[in-house]
Amino acid sequence: MKRTRHFASDNYSGVCPEAWAAMAEANAGHEVSYGDDHWTQRATDLIREIFETDCEVFFVFNGTAANSLSLASLCQPYHSILCHELGHIETAECGAPEFFSNGSKILLLPGANGKIAPAAVEHAVRRRSDIHYPKPGALSLTQVTEVGTAYSVAEVKALAETAKKLGLRVQMDGARFANAVASLGVSPADITWRAGVDVLCFGGSKNGIALGEAVVFFNRELAHEFDYRCKQGGQLASKMRFLSAPWLGMLKDGAWLRHAGHSNAMARRLEAGLRDIPGVSISYPVQSNAVFAKIPPTAEEKLRDRGWHFYTGVITPEEARLMCSWDTTPEDVDAFVADLLRILG
Ligand SMILES: Cc1ncc(COP(=O)(O)O)c(C=O)c1O
């Protein structure tokens, strides 16, 4: 059966109407290139307004570049970057953070539900102080985490406090930052710079933009010459307005939070449907647009036969990862659940 929408990835979805309309508007006539255009200026100003601070903002093509280039600007090559063992920068960026930082080593921390605890940061830093150990330079937090859980303001604060005490900078991989803000109902400022985050990679594509992320430096000194890093890393868009204008469309009247809130709600609906099916179990608290579920492998096969796309093995071989998007409908969710119910009898 051919299906229009899937649960494989929030990257599977198309562009939301607000981002699309802003692109169309930006397409009228000629405009200054390489970011000196008024769309980029307005999008930057709006991000400053939303975060209630005079941050430095750069628009890049994807999350790998945002993470890698921002981490490179926080670290020297002899530094290490602490992250959760499931961290995207470790598992899914092909060594780009190490490459762009000229060798900064990623050190992995354990933690339940995809989260790092302050004690793990402390342990990783204090266990060695000799010259042979890559000097810890940065802590990278993923918000929401790779298993879809959200760090609370208090958790980010405690981690950042520990990091700062130990001399580390704090970077946040916010590929799904919108989902975190919508889920927690907090102000963007409270969960970032007021909690001690130095730089945020603010995700756009998973929220409904065609492509692109905003690198937001709250600590402006760390943005020194970041424009050159972007250019050298192939991340300075000549027609920058098409990267920046969609942000205006998303942010100006709250579409970013509406879409994230909707995808979160679809995930909760999916969780509620799956929870009652005998033989199926939910692996992690559902706090964003992701549901991880253990489904019998034969049933997974049958779901795929019925045209559903989803990944298994992102975290463990037994877990299916089901992602909801800005355009997932309640009918999509109910049809998936109904199919699984029929399959499992
Ligand atoms: C946690 C996380 N960080 C960053 C990214 C961005 O990666 P990409 O380079 O594919 O845009 C993703 C995308 O899957 C992600 O899940």
Image (spheres, rainbow, N blue to C red):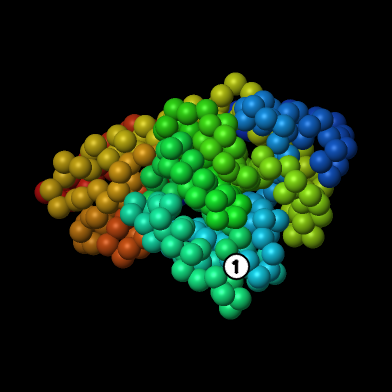
Q: Which residue is mark 1?
A: 135
- Label 1 sits on a secondary structure element that is strand
Taking depth in this image into account, of 223 and 159 the one nearest to the observer is 159
Instruction: Kindly give the residue lying farthest to the bottom in the view shown.
Output: 132
Q: Is residue 228 left or right of residue 166?
A: right
Whole-percent x, y for residue 255 in the image:
55, 27
Q: Looking at the picture, does residue 129 appear above or below residue 141?
A: below
Visible residue check, residue 197 = yes
Whole-percent x, y for residue 84 in the image:
45, 58
Whole-percent x, y for residue 44 in the image:
73, 33
Q: How many marks?
A: 1
Q: Give the residue drawn at x 84%, y 44%.
A: 34
Taking depth in this image into account, of 120 and 150 the one nearest to the observer is 120
- Label 1: few (<14), some or many (≥20) within 10 Å? many
Identify the image quadrant of residue 270.
top left
Q: Give the residue drawn at x 46%, y 36%.
A: 153
Identify the image quadrant of residue 272.
top left
Whole-percent x, y for residue 191 in the image:
52, 36
Amino acid beneath label 1: Lys
Q: Give the residue drawn at x 59%, y 55%.
A: 168
Q: Give the residue drawn at x 43%, y 37%.
A: 154
Q: Looking at the picture, does residue 133 appear above or below residue 51?
A: below
Visible residue check, residue 242 = no
Q: Is residue 334 left or right of residue 314?
A: left
